[in-house]
Image (cartoon, rainbow, N blue to C red):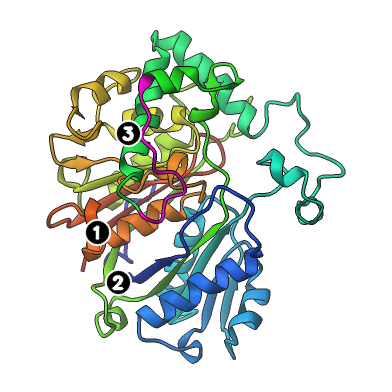
Amino acid sequence: MSTTNPLRHKVAIAGAASTGFTAANTPMSQTALAARACVEVIRQCGLTADDIDGICGSTPSSAELQAALGIPRATWVASPFIPFGNHVAAAVSAVYSGLAEVVLVYHAAYRLAWNTASSLKDPFRRIATPGLTEPHPGPETMAASVGYTAWASRYIHEYGAGKEDFGLVAINDRSNAAMNPLAAIHKPITMDDYFAARMIREPLCLLDMDLPVDGADAFIVTSAERARDLPLPPVLVDAVVLGQVGRNEEDQIAGLGEHGQQVVVDALKAKSEFWIDDVDVYLPYDGFTILTLSWIENAGWCGRGEAGDFLRQHWDPKTNRVLIDGRVPMNPHGGSLSEGATQGSGHVREAVHQLQGLAGERQVADAQRALVTPGGFFFNAQGITLTRG
């Protein structure tokens, strides 16, 4: 494993913008949502379409978005697969290598027929859902979300964990979302609400799974030197890594102690200037509550199987949320479970806003460093450390 990190503090995220998120089918297309967020971040950073020479996003395509925004020329484009850590890694690499100087990075979350029944009933959204006529993966495979329900069962069996451990993740997110005007859902929940939620696939209920939404995030990634000349405080990329093991399919990983998260943590710790003892905000992925418990343990906050106890030890009864050591929030924006399923772009945006001092009511005092761990177990574990410039 390489421990070198020549791009440390050479690349920055200069700004982040969002449309906000709606847990209902809106009249806007993915392209319109992405374009709205992109226009906002370009304006915030004092740039114009002529300044953009790199474009990075998965939906809509970079070609479609470039045409919509009127960006005249691009020397580098990419369409990475989600989660959003892939986009960050690609854009940072492009800037550091000189393939582009100013990269527009975006992601539009969109309710489609594979993630919400109301979209399945909408003929236009059915058409917009790739592969719907020949569903893949099939309903009885271990692929995609079904794999996480199986590993959640394994977690309960292996560590003797209770469903309450999963519930704490959901409650923390909802309490935090109440302070986030961008979030799709703000109403607080209790443990009784969690246990009363509809079971989707044992042991995970509706509140264990991320919330399908319409909305978009956008970012400007450029050199640290260029970012310092722009209006907003730069957020420097300390390190970014991706993680995958040899057996990385849902039904093939060796166990809870051997998957992509461990690869990410080992590499990110080796490449970063700081780790959990020095972070001011922690943003673990929460597409499923089991992922958050696993990230907490693998990051080193506690031992395996101890994430539930860790959350209880750091629970703030006044605000009904987690404050690690009384000060470090976990997913202060509400995460995928309550802000909405942004596939990680919301986690990165929240980290940027916290480090720029733009997080409003949920702002962490004098936030200097953030740890973001997007993605899951299998082929999509990722990690990013960010610091105020």
Q: Secondary structure at mark 2?
A: loop
Q: Secondary structure at mark 1?
A: helix
The secondary structure making up most of the magenta span is: loop
Instruction: Report the residue at 57% width, 60% height from top.
Output: 108
Residue that lies at the very extreme toward the front in this rendered image: 187
Residue type beneath disc 2? Lys
Question: Label 1, on which residue?
Answer: 360
Chain part drawn in magenta: 181-191
Do residues under tags 2 and 3 come within 8 Å of each other at their CB atoms? no
- x then y, percent, for residue 303: 28, 21
Taking the magenta stretch, the answer to whether it contains residue 340 is no
Question: Label 2, on which residue?
Answer: 10
Q: Quadrant of residue 92?
A: bottom left
Question: Label 3, on which residue?
Answer: 172
Along the line of sight, the residue nearer the viewer: 333 or 87: 333
Q: Is residue 82 visible?
A: yes
Q: Tell me: 180 left or right of 132.
A: left
Along the line of sight, the residue nearer the viewer: 81 or 36: 36
- x then y, percent, for residue 194: 44, 22
- Mark 1 surroundings within 10 Å by alpha-carbon count, few (fewer than 14), some (14 through 19), many (20 or more): few
Q: Is residue 20 above or below residue 189?
A: below
Q: Return the disc, 2 or 1, that comes first in the chain's sequence.
A: 2
- x then y, percent, for residue 147: 61, 27
Q: CA distance from mark 2 to mark 3?
A: 34 Å
Taking the magenta stretch, the answer to whether it contains residue 190 is yes
Residue type beneath disc 3? Asn
Quadrant showing the N terminus: top left
Along the line of sight, the residue nearer the viewer: 315 or 225: 315
Q: Secondary structure at mark 3?
A: helix
Q: Tell me: 232 left or right of 29.
A: left
